[in-house]
Amino acid sequence: MRVAVVMGSTSDLVKLVDMIDFLKKYDIQVDVRALSAHRAHDALASFIEDTKTNGTEVIIAAAGKAAHLPGVIAAMTTSPVIGVPIKGSALDGMDALLSIVQMPAGIPVATVAIDGSMNAGILAMQMMAIKHDNLKAALIDYKTAMTNSCLAANEKLMEEYK
Ligand code: RP5
């Protein structure tokens, strides 16, 4: 179980650390890189080339502003690419969201919400769970815990307003 997390700049890392820790908790190998598509394109291409043979199953790509990184990566591989638009500009992340989600036909990038990296991690796990039964079981537990906490909050609310 191996995921690559590529960000456009180390300034994006703060928005991704919780997701990276979450994936590691499930014994997923996470290769973390800051490789800009416009400042380090050769190194990016070389890293993506390596993912084709080293067991990487999903690539998560995060970028802000004119966020071409996820689309450029998707152009270089047949692995699924999940894009995370990072908020960090005068346009509050809308620029990154549209840059990532509006990919022309043929090169899809599965796009999550602005700064929504946790959903990118969960989606990556769900993709890998097609093959790995242990991840499927872990995701069922995760969703059950979420349901239980939601129902407990509802019970508390009903108690307060009865
Ligand atoms: C994007 O530009 C990066 O993904 C980052 O979100 C933004 C700013 O980058 P830095 O100027 O902090 O390197 O390429």
Image (spheres, rainbow, N blue to C red):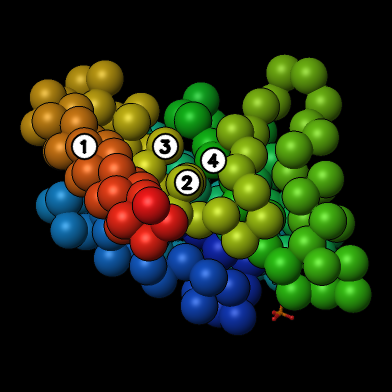
* Residue mark closest to the camera, 3 vs 1: 1
160 and 7: which one is in front? Answer: 160
What number is the disc on residue 82? 4
How crowded pointer 3 is (Cα within 10 Å; few <14, some 14-19, many 20+) is rated as: some
Mark 4 near mark 3, Cβ–Cβ under 8 Å? yes
Q: Give how far apart the Cα atoms at labels 1 and 4 are.
A: 24 Å
x and y, in percent, of residue 7 in the image: 56, 63
Q: Secondary structure at mark 3?
A: helix
> Residue most toward the front?
162
Q: Amino acid at mark 2?
A: Ala
| Among numbered discs 3 and 1, the one appearing first in the sequence | 3
What number is the disc on residue 19? none
Residue wearing tag 3: 123
x and y, in percent, of residue 116 in the image: 56, 55
89 and 29: which one is in front? Answer: 89
User: Is 47 above or below relative to 8?
Assistant: above
Residue wearing tag 2: 120
